[in-house]
Amino acid sequence: MTTTAGTERRAWQLVLDRVELDLLSGRLGPGDHLPPERQLAVELGVGRSSVREAIRVLEVLGLIRTSVGSGPSAGAIIVALPGGGMSALMRLQVAAQGFPVADVVKTRLVLEGSVVSDLAERCAPGPFGGAGDAVADGCPDLTESRVLLTAMDRPELTEAEFLALDAQFHLSLAEAGGNQVVTATMAGLRSAIEGYARAGLAGLVSWPATSARLRLEHRAILAAIAAGDPEGARLAVQGHIAGYYAETQLTSTTPTL
Amino acid sequence: MTTTAGTERRAWQLVLDRVELDLLSGRLGPGDHLPPERQLAVELGVGRSSVREAIRVLEVLGLIRTSVGSGPSAGAIIVALPGGGMSALMRLQVAAQGFPVADVVKTRLVLEGSVVSDLAERCAPGPFGGAGDAVADGCPDLTESRVLLTAMDRPELTEAEFLALDAQFHLSLAEAGGNQVVTATMAGLRSAIEGYARAGLAGLVSWPATSARLRLEHRAILAAIAAGDPEGARLAVQGHIAGYYAETQLTSTTPTL
DNA sequence: AGACCACTTGTGGTCTGACCACACCATTTT
DNA sequence: AAAATGGTGTGGTCAGACCACAAGTGGTCT
């Protein structure tokens, strides 16, 4: 009787299945409300606690946002912001040693190299000289990246503040690329090794020298993009990232708790 | 950064924090058991249901495996297998339109292109002719990929079976690359658009022709890797993936529920 | 001595019911 | 008209109970 293998999904999985099905069928979309927990429980024939377990998963995955109270902004609303979920996943996997730090850094190299190379490609003057090229998108706006660069020039910044701006700068490049998957993944990778990056600060010979070099490298990256030099941008960003982690011997340090 | 929120963390977040801290400090590692739910609840001063919400998140993220019963294999055990969590995240984000399908495909192109290029690089005869080169790792074993190729040659395969083998083939390449992050990410990307790939089958002009072409392209990819031709391998794999999705007009179809 | 079997124990899985804090909304009061 | 009031529905949390399950435990029988 109980050996009917296959359909023994657990109660909370039923809720997850239901939500996924509603999303795929279009019954649910961004901005919509999930049914109230109690209603979902009776509809699916499960307890409210099981519904809540599924809701919690959806929340951590960045699919929904929950708010207490009443009214249109309360309840569980579909937001589909993958950044937080990706960060949580990668941070925990690195902590549990499912993701070696070296692999995280390597993946960053690949993705960010691709991003800046693509950006430079799109910012290069087309073979026909005009902007209305056959390329999908034109040169995106890099204003935010430039603003962050100047913000990083302020001499009174602490090391942690500088690192935070540095993270934002790299993320702004990914956002300029326009690929949601890449942006979220890069955000996750970055947050996964954030603790290690902070810990690496202690091992630096000279922070002023390092930060000055980082500033120069940031400008070189943007310059290569603006100049339409894909390969130069790729090499610049890869040298930038790999250089910092080599300098701080990141893989051999323990993160700051 | 965190807006000085302080003690407003919700009960289930306390549990998550505790587990993450134990992981980072080394008190918990792969293979270890989490404390029993009831004990964890008492230790942290929260209800068992809150503990369970956190446990559920960890399970979906692929960090732990839970089993009922007694004995050494029961309870919540840290496994750190990121594949499932990545798949769930990306599948749901695509379903909720947080990840455009086009971006998923583009990211696949970047990552898999990098993987096969790297494989080819490592399989190329070094400038000194020997295998003991300064390169980190030698040419990895591609036996599994070849086995899958021959498996795909069987003429009695259904379309779905062929697609499943195709997915395994691509995954085997990622695994050969040895980067855990890339492997898990590619597995997630693949599963996110699996439904769309299946749906695209219906729009094909001729499945026998398409499958024959896919078989040839697979062999070309492996050949380029074995020949130590990074750029050729990259182009082969990118053409392979982009070609299939262009042919099936994937982005304009609805997935099979 | 060895094999077998019922019982105990500890685990996750689930449900129920209750209470709280909160935010909106309709009503009443000023 | 404006302000105070209470109602209502939401998620957040807890406590307790029961179940299914898998190992251990100890006894009994051969």
Image: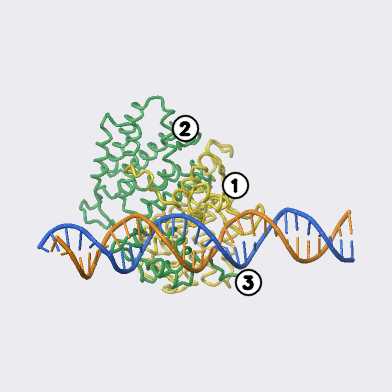
Chain colours: A green, B yellow, C orange, D blue
Counting from the top left corner in percent of width and height, residue B33 is at 59, 49
Q: Is residue A82 visible?
A: yes
Mark 2 crowd level (few <14, some 14–19, many ≥20, 10 Å Cα): some
**Which quarter of the rendering shows the N terminus of chain A?**
bottom right
Task: Specify the amino acid type for callout 1.
Answer: Asp
Task: Specify the amino acid type for callout 3.
Answer: Thr
Residue A2's label in the rendered image is 3
Kind of element beneath mark 2: loop
* Residue underneath mark 1: B32
Relative to A127, is A9 above or below? below
Residue A249's label in the rendered image is 2
Q: Is residue C18 left or right of residue A9?
A: left
Kind of element beneath mark 1: loop
From the image, state whether disc 2 or disc 3 is nearer to you: 3
Mark 1 crowd level (few <14, some 14–19, many ≥20, 10 Å Cα): few
User: Which residue is painted at 41% across and 31% down in the image?
Assistant: A201
Kind of element beneath mark 3: loop
User: Who is closer to the viewer here, A19 or B127?
Assistant: A19
Q: Is residue B149 left or right of residue A220?
A: right
Q: Is residue B105 visible?
A: no
Relative to A158, is B204 above or below? below
Label 2: chain?
A
Task: Specify the amino acid type for callout 2.
Answer: Gln
Question: For the residues marked 2 and 3, what is the alpha-carbon distance in whole angstroms?
Answer: 54 Å
Label 3: chain?
A
Q: Quadrant of residue A79?
A: bottom left
